[in-house]
Image (tube, rainbow, N blue to C red):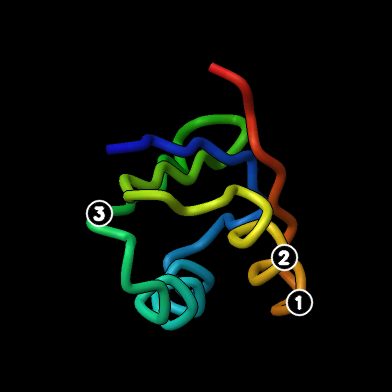
């Protein structure tokens, strides 16, 4: 199990809904959530064998800023 953490520019529940559609297309994602209270609008993903670059690319193609954070 891997936990991936990203800084995003998602600031509203409406944008979270847009991301939901993208993230459900990844079969290896088991769980995900946003912390919109955090200054970095954190996205956490629990997955098996998913490359952080795949998430960054998919969200950036959809016009959503996303950058992996080291934790």
- Residue 7 picture quarter: top right
Residue at (27% x, 38% y) in the render: 1
Question: What crowding class fits label 3: few (fewer than 14 Cα within 10 Å), some (14-19), or many (20 or more)?
Answer: few
| Whole-percent x, y for residue 33 in the image | 33, 50
Q: Which tag, 2 or 3, sits closer to the chain's start? A: 3
Q: Which residue is mark 1?
A: 61
Q: CA distance from mark 2 to mark 3?
A: 19 Å
Residue 47 image offset from top left, x and y in percent = 33, 50
Q: Secondary structure at mark 3?
A: strand
Which of pointers 1 and 3 lies earlier in the amino acid sequence? Answer: 3
Q: Position of residue 27 (x, y in %)?
A: 32, 73
Q: Is residue 67 left or right of 49 when viewed as pictured?
A: right
Residue at 23% over, 57% down: 30
53 and 68: which one is in front? 53
Residue depicted at x 50% and y 31%: 38
Q: Position of residue 31 (x, y in %)?
A: 25, 54
């Amino acid at each position: 199990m891997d936990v991936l953490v990203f800084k995003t520019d998602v600031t509203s529940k409406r944008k979270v809904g847009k991301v939901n559609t993208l993230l459900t297309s990844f079969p290896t994602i088991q769980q995900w959530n946003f912390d919109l209270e955090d200054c970095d609008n954190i996205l956490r993903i629990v997955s098996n064998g998913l490359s952080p670059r795949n998430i960054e690319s998919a969200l950036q193609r959809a016009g959503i800023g996303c950058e992996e954070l080291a934790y």
